[in-house]
Image: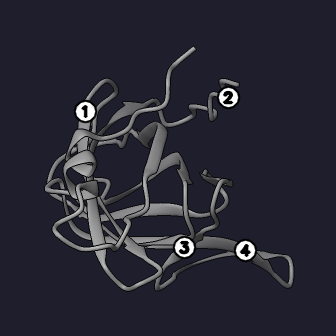
Amino acid sequence: MQKPLLAAPLLAALVLLGSAVAHAEVIVAEPWVRATVPAQKATGAFMHLKSDTDARLVSAASPVAGVVEIHEMFMDKDVMKMSPIPGLELPAGQDVELKPGGYHVMLMDLKQQVKVGDEVPLTLTIENKDGSRATIELKAAARPLNAPMKMHH
């Protein structure tokens, strides 16, 4: 059973800087990306996010991609569609799953092939209710193209 990962840089962001503003503590569990084939220019990153207070995932970045966006997939008249969204709500205490076929982080304009076993660096930006922001640095393991989401509870 893999334990949830609380990214160390977030802990530093949680330190109160002389103010009474509390920042959301967000736990990231099971981060992974789908490996690619040569010349493939996009892939998805998936994970579980859980915040102790209401917050939002507002952006993501990675040095392996020229463009990184938060996306949703949905059915529209029997057609699966994908589109970017401005942010993803993280309701206090609830597990928010980013998974294939649902919400995910889209890595586009890949600079190189993502191979099985690679550790892909990601930076997530979380916005708190007061508008302040904190970042989480993490690494997501690349899994095979046909990898199912592993569930550990």
**Residue at 65%, 70% in the rendered image:** 73
What is the secondary structure assignment of the residue under circle 4?
strand
Q: Earlier in the sequence, mark 4 or mark 3?
A: 4
Cα separation, mark 4 vs mark 3, equals 15 Å
Crowding at dot 3, Cα within 10 Å, few <14 / some 14-19 / many 20+, comes out as: many
Cα separation, mark 4 vs mark 1, equals 28 Å
What residue would you read off at disc 4?
74
What is the secondary structure assignment of the residue under circle 2?
loop
**Residue at 44%, 30% in the rendered image:** 143
Q: Amino acid at mark 1?
A: Glu
Cα separation, mark 2 vs mark 3, equals 21 Å
Q: Amino acid at mark 3?
A: Leu
Cα separation, mark 4 vs mark 2, equals 22 Å
- The mark lying in front, picked from 4 and 3, is 3
Q: Earlier in the sequence, mark 1 or mark 3?
A: 3
Q: Earlier in the sequence, mark 1 or mark 2?
A: 1
What residue would you read off at disc 1?
119
Judge left or right: residue 3 versus residue 90: left
Spot occupied by residue 101 in the image (x, y as percentages of width and height): 67, 58
What is the secondary structure assignment of the residue under circle 1?
strand
- The mark lying in front, picked from 4 and 2, is 2
Cα separation, mark 1 vs mark 3, equals 24 Å
Residue 28, image quadrant = top left
Judge left or right: residue 38 versus residue 97: left
How many numbered marks are there?
4
**Residue at 45%, 71% in the rendered image:** 70
What residue would you read off at disc 2?
151
Of 96 and 119, the residue lying toward us = 96
- The mark lying in front, picked from 1 and 3, is 3
What residue would you read off at disc 3?
88
